[in-house]
Image (tube, rainbow, N blue to C red):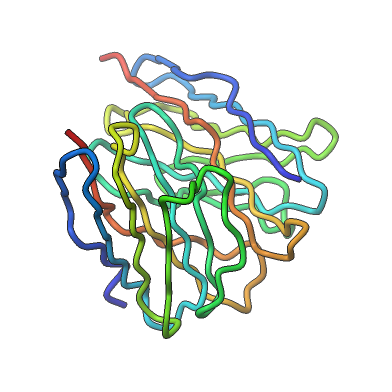
Amino acid sequence: AQSVTQLDSHVSVSEGTPVLLRCNYSSSYSPSLFWYVQHPNKGLQLLLKYTSAATLVKGINGFEAEFKKSETSFHLTKPSAHMSDAAEYFCVVSGWSGSSASKIIFGSGTRLSIRP
Amino acid sequence: DTGVSQDPRHKITKRGQNVTFRCDPISEHNRLYWYRQTLGQGPEFLTYFQNEAQLEKSRLLSDRFSAERPKGSFSTLEIQRTEQGDSAMYLCASRRTGGGTNEKLFFGSGTQLSVL
């Protein structure tokens, strides 16, 4: 079985300060992990994905995430927030379920607000 | 790559009516997913197809819900005897095979269902 927990439902930071969005996962198999972003009235867009090639993953718009197996975490960070980063962010785990289907599970989301 | 298309974009219906949504995935993608998203929540997995085979269904999918993908291309999601609790955004996504569990999902814009 697999699951994903986003530890904060809402994060608010000032423009130009660092961003940290936390995600913990649980998986019976070696998972693939993703972060997706959803801007208001827009579709879901892939930010980055972990594919086991490197534990530090760089994505679009200056975001990156570090896979820590010992902590079962995949936190999303950005050194300096921009107003355009305000959106909903979803941590996603993908792995093989018992039925061998490629099941993809979304976290409940973290709403990122940026203060001017 | 024309993207994932969903039709209609919006659907307003009265309680008790049946509704059907259509999803056209990216043409070379053989995996197709349906999700439901309510305000402030992450997308919830409903069901998954590989080609025409429906490999997994969530317990969220009651007997009133049925999904098909008859020729392994487009898919339909039907809700019978709609209830107000069915009001949500219904998202379709596809991914290609061969890349394992780390292939990204491509999402459609969704169908927003409102049950009055």
Quadrant where the C terminus of chain B is found in the figure? top left
Q: Is residue A59 above or below residue B47?
A: above
Q: Residue at (81%, 53%) from the top-left corner? A: A29
Q: Residue at (58%, 77%) from the top-left corner? A: B97
Quadrant where the N terminus of chain B is found in the figure? bottom left
Q: Nearer the viewer, residue A29 or A32?
A: A29
Q: Residue at (78%, 57%) from the top-left corner? A: A98
Q: Nearer the viewer, residue A51 or B97?
A: B97
Q: Is B9 left, or right, of A95 in this rendering?
A: left
Q: Is residue A42 above or below residue B7?
A: above
Residue A85: x percent and y percent?
34, 32
Q: Is A102 left, or right, of B104 in this rendering?
A: right
Q: Residue at (30%, 14%) from the top-left corner? A: A115
Q: Is residue B108 above or below residue B75?
A: above
Q: Quadrant of residue A56?
A: top right
Q: Is residue A21 above or below residue B77?
A: above
Residue A65: x percent and y percent?
60, 40
Residue B5: x percent and y percent?
26, 67
Q: Nearer the viewer, residue B81 or A114?
A: B81
Task: Count how many numbered circles sit on residues in the image.
Answer: 0
